[in-house]
Image: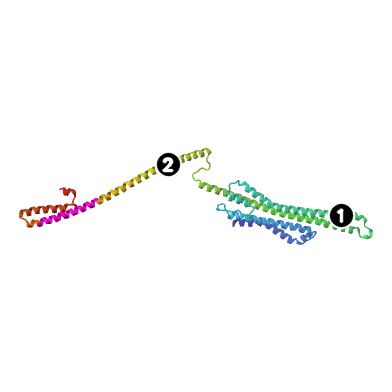
Amino acid sequence: MLVTQRFLLFLLRPFSVIFVLIVLIGIYFPSFSSMFMINPWLNGAIFSITLLGLGILTFQMFFIYKEFKYLEVHQPQKLRIFPNPSLPFSFPILQWYQSGMHIDVQLPLAQCEKRLAQRLKFGQFLAGTLVFSGLLGTLWGLSQSIIVMADMFQNVFTIEPGKGDFLMVIKDYLSGALSKMGLAFSSSLLGLGGSVLVHFFLVQLGTLQGQWYDRIVRWVQDSLNNKASTELTRRIGLDEAIAPDVMLSLLNRILTSLEGFSGTNKVQLQRCQDLTECFLSFSTKVQDLSDLMKAQHHILNKWAQEQMSSRHALEIMGSKLEDLGFSGDEATRQALTKIATCCEFLARNSGYENPSNTVS
């Protein structure tokens, strides 16, 4: 939006000049028309060349405005900016930006200057053509005036007395000479006036091109600053410039560290292998211990079953001795009662009491 406002303010100067010229032509139109009609072919050609030059230069101004708009929209902070072939002035700079800004920026800037100068050459050619056309009309009018004056001096002394008044003849010859002089001055005035007007538009176009060139230089500087800041953020903690000896010592340290890391890795690998073998041996020992505990558990179960059967046999023997005691005499009964009490005691304490209780 700001670029558009500045461009419209810039166009106010050349178009105000055009407006003033149109107003003056409208005010003095009869004089301008009579001057133009002295030689309509040559003056018409001069007027057409003038309009062509003004139209081309105005188109070039709008073309520069398009370049301004593109640079305003595509800032250097954009991630990707593609060159636009329809923008011949910005194309070398955009190619330089897309290639990573590795080459010298003066090369694309020189190409931009060359293209700007080439766009001014056609307008300069038209201005020179207008000057030449004006001079051509002037020379042709002067030559015709000289021819008329020569005819007058050649024929003025050969006029017969009956042909008319001498002064009237001189007047006719002078009128023809002055008309040719009017042709010369009209062509010269139109040619030089058109050349001045075209040169004025050339100056305005050159000023606009200078403003665009300053803008593209600032755009390039912003691009370089953005690239430098990006690289600086990627290299936090590192110096921007490293001396060769510092770089060599740094590389030597890196190689030494890599060699030590390789040797340490070999030692660590050997330790891992030894540790793996220890774990395998420990696993084998644990498996053997598990098998041994299973065998001991089987033996303990068998011993408990034997104790249960011994207790059952002692209980049966005690009951039989008790029955036997009822059928014998008193002494035998008492002896058998003691034996039965001992069997019951053994049966009650066998297999389930602690070894210390059994011994006691």
Q: Mark 2 belongs to which amino acid?
A: Lys
The answer to if 316 sits in the magenta stretch is yes
What residue is at 71 percent from the left and 54 percent from the top? Answer: 198
Local crowd at mark 1 within 10 Å, few (<14), some, or many (≥20)?
A: some
Q: Magenta part of the protein: which range?
A: 299-323
Q: Earlier in the sequence, mark 1 or mark 2?
A: 1
* Figure label count: 2
Q: Quadrant of residue 162?
A: bottom right
What residue is at 93 percent from the left and 60 percent from the top? Answer: 163
Q: Which residue position is annotated with label 1? A: 149
Residue 305 lies, in percent from the top left, at 21, 53
Let me know if residue 35 appears in the view. no
Residue 54 lies, in percent from the top left, at 70, 56
The answer to if 60 sits in the magenta stretch is no
By what rule are the colours in the image chosen? rainbow
Which labelled disc corresponds to residue 266? 2
Q: Residue furthest right?
A: 161
Asked whether 183 or 99 is in front, the reply is 99
Assign the magenta stretch its main secondary structure: helix
Local crowd at mark 2 within 10 Å, few (<14), some, or many (≥20)?
A: few
What residue is at 70 percent from the left and 51 percent from the top? Answer: 121
4 to 266, vertically: above or below: below
68 to 279, vertically: above or below: below
